[in-house]
Amino acid sequence: MDRPVDFYRDRQMRHDRCGHTCIVDLAWYERYAESAHGCPGCGDNADLGDALRFTGDPADPVLSDGFAAEVMWFHTTTRQDWPTPIDFAATLSDDIRRMMGDADGWALRQSSKALHIGNYESAVHNMLRRMRDQGGKGEQFYLFGVRLRPDVAILPGSMIDPCRNWGDVWLDQIASPEIDVVRYVNVYEDPGGLSAAIRPSAIAATQCLPIPLAVAGDDPWVADIAARLQSVSTELTPLPDDLSEFPYLHRETHRSKAAREIAEVLAAGLPATMEYQFESAVRWEDGDDPAEWARYARSLCALVEDAERVLGEVAAQPVREL
Ligand SMILES: [Zn+2]
């Protein structure tokens, strides 16, 4: 049982103050978030504080408790041993322990934080965000397929993303002690999609796939782009005339400019909320190898464009029972 993957589906939004609801695409939302246009109901811009919010799709099959307990959920991380808890107690020196007082209580609390799982789209988006925001570029990421225990207790319905205000979340903050799974409308990753905050004990099994997948060695696009980049000079581009009095401004090389322009074309084919993060993830750095760069850019795009292949690979990985 799987959730259909569609990075480009429409999203439902509501402006609580004026009561307007609308169905929009991600390009519309990006322009709204940049205040290029206002709420269709009242005209207010997103920067006025109480913006339109994603409400989730009431027809999302994962709102069915039976479906949510059976479907494969996803998570991306740089930790190959996820969801094994990090041994926080082992990270503390004796001096820090003395200063903290209840260091063991703190460590226990850290390891009982809610884990976050979501649809495939949100897992891919999470990886791109982490590459950009948290310096994860160049690190190996892993996509986890996650199965819940069949008897998990799921809070009915869904809530607004509890991480929006709080960052880390503990299930006991948002639900009663017998609840294992809380569905919420994600506002950051695959916005409008349904994710879940879960107790670590709710996971029955995982399957782990290193991503992105390797691109075929004879991929013609990679060969073409690599040849094109190789043919471009690594000299700095000239300063525009009107900036010639600022010789220390950042200047790109002809090759990094060519790579940037190729990345912009690729990004334009991705969901609007991922464009900037993709361009950042593949930003050319001096010394990059043209063929490796092209393979990497292509492999990241394939996570969106060839999701079926990735999902097939996840399903073929060994199952780790927890
Ligand atoms: Zn409005």
Image (cartoon, helix red, strand yellow):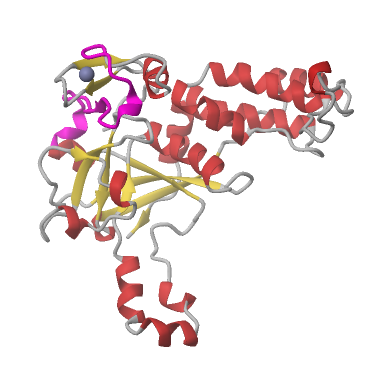
> In the image, is residue 185 above or below residue 260?
below
Residue at the farthest front position: 245
Q: Quadrant of residue 235?
A: top right
Q: Quadrant of residue 103?
A: bottom left
> Residue 230 location in percent, x, y?
85, 25
Magenta stretch: give its range: 40-64
Q: For this rendering, which residue is in front, 298 or 37?
A: 37
Q: Would residue 22 appear left or right of 288 to someone viewing this image?
A: left
Quarter of the picture holding the N terminus: top left
Q: Residue at x 77, y 30 (%)?
A: 291
Residue 59 shown in magenta: yes
Q: Magenta span: helix, strand or loop, mainly?
A: loop
- Taking the image as drawn, is residue 155 in sight? yes
Q: Quadrant of ligand 1?
A: top left
Q: Residue at x 21, y 56 (%)?
A: 171
- Taking the image as drawn, is residue 271 in sight? no
Residue 293 shown in magenta: no
Q: Residue at x 41, y 88 (%)?
A: 98
> Residue 99 location in percent, x, y?
41, 84
> Residue 59 location in percent, x, y?
17, 23
